[in-house]
Image (spheres, rainbow, N blue to C red):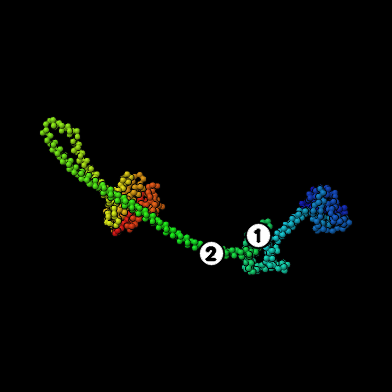
Amino acid sequence: MISLEHLMLDYSRYMMLLVEPGELRIIVANKIVEKMLGYSEAELLAMPITNIESSLQDVFYWEDVRNGQYQDIETQDGLYQCADGSMLTVTKSVKVIDHEGSPLILVQARDVQNEHKAEDALAQILSQLRATLESTGNGILVIDWHGKIANMNRQFSSMWGISDELLLEGEEADILEFIAGLVAEPEIFRMRLQELVGNSETEDILSLNDGRIFECRSRPQYLGEHIIGRVFGFNDITERKRAEEALRDSRDELEEQVRKRTESLQMANTQLLAEKARQEELIRQLEETQMQLLQSEKMASIGQLAAGVAHEINNPIGFVNSNLSTLQEYVDGMLALLAAYERIEGLLVNEALQNITHLKQEINIGYLREDIGDLLAESLDGLQRVRRIVKDLKDFSHVGELEQQSANLEAGLDSTLNVVWNEIKYKADVVKEYGGIPEINCIASQLNQVFMNLLINAVQAIEDHGRITIRTAYDEQNVWVEVEDTGKGIKPEQLGKIFDPFFTTKSVGMGTGLGLSLSYGIVKKHNGRIEVKSELGKGTCFRVCLPRAG
């Protein structure tokens, strides 16, 4: 069974060898020795310690031990010979112990080969870090979590003007207090230097008493996951700030010049726009006036033509009507004579009676007697209708009328309706709801033109067949005429534009966009107004409201 002592040795972290000093023979070796050096336990117990410790200083030491000169060794680096011939770098300690009155040598050793490599690598990293810190243009200050200065570069001490005496004294509190005293707001800077364990990064602008400006950035220093301090980086941005201020001043001055120039341009542009708007308004008014003049001239020409046609028609109508009246008298006389002859037919001889009877049958005397009166009555009625149409044309045109005269608007509606009846009769039923309005002073021909435009628009708004209602009413101050249709209506967004010149809701070729504009101008000249109400899909109602006083 393995002894407890030997078991403890096998689980030690160190290589442990017990050497008999007389022959320098290894009498005990733990398992870690076998593992690290590659020898078996039998090989170790059969060899002297000098087969393993072969350096010159070790040979001298063990020779002194053989001669009875024992000496403890606390820590010493050495080389151990491995079974494969390689050398293992170790750190060992030697202890002389007493066993039953006889001395024994206890050697403890551990592999430091990787530790030396790590130390060399760390030394190289520290050297590179130092070179980096010294080569950077920023001042670097490292403070550990105890508030002590762990590191700083020469740039930091140079930019803060820390004297050599203060650096040699090495009092961190004095150095930190010295740099805080150089800042315009020292208390805030002291608080920043004391915030060491926070995990956030900071950025501050420090104004120094001598006019310089430093940019201070800090971030936590980690060891693993733990914060062990904070690294502060300082950058002198005085020149940059001055350049920025100069640039800002130049920019402000330029912006002020641009603002003034912009205001001047905007003022000039506003004046140009106002002048352009005024010119456009003048052009619009000129175009509208020109179109109204053209329309007025056209209506005057139509009126003159209608009056001429009426005059020319009146002449033949006069003598035709006179002739028909005379003809009716002649026919009545002839029919009376014929009746007298019929009363004496019985006195005629048979041969003459037969001839007359045969002739009456050929000409169908009974039908002629009945139909000739109807023909004359219908002809006279047709002449009366022609005379009414001619009268309506004359009433509608009012040729030569330039000043306001007393007129009946309902009569004007009737005459206008007769003029445009051919446009209406196939598409709409006309309902008249006259309120018996009094006569007003107006230019009747111009208002008739307004009524005609409203009636034409109403019938064109009806797609299949509908109804047009004409209403009149009045109160103490005004009279008004309404023309309402059951057409397709006007879109709400178009209601504000319908009186603009050349604006039309009709399809191409159906309208010029001048009818309502001219109507609006005519009603305005009569000190009246046109109102409109419309519902999409249900119809539109226009109201012409005019003052009774003219």
Measuring from the top left, give residue 200's x and y in whole percent.
Answer: 63, 59
Q: Which amino acid does label 1 sit on?
A: Pro
- Which structural element holds mark 2? helix
Measuring from the top left, give residue 144's x and y in whole percent.
Answer: 68, 62
Residue 475, picture quadrant: bottom left
Q: Do the residues labelled 2 and 1 touch (CB within 8 Å)?
A: no
Q: Mark 2 points at which residue?
A: 256
Q: Mark 1 points at which residue?
A: 220
Q: Residue at x 88, y 54 (%)?
A: 22
Residue 29: in sight, yes or no? no
Measuring from the top left, give residue 148's x and y in whole percent.
Answer: 69, 64
Residue 455: in sight, yes or no? yes
Q: Residue at x 20, y 44 (%)?
A: 323
Q: Which residue is drawn at 28% across and 49% down?
A: 308
Residue 68, picture quadrant: bottom right
- Crowding near pointer 2: few (<14 within 10 Å), some, many (20+)? few
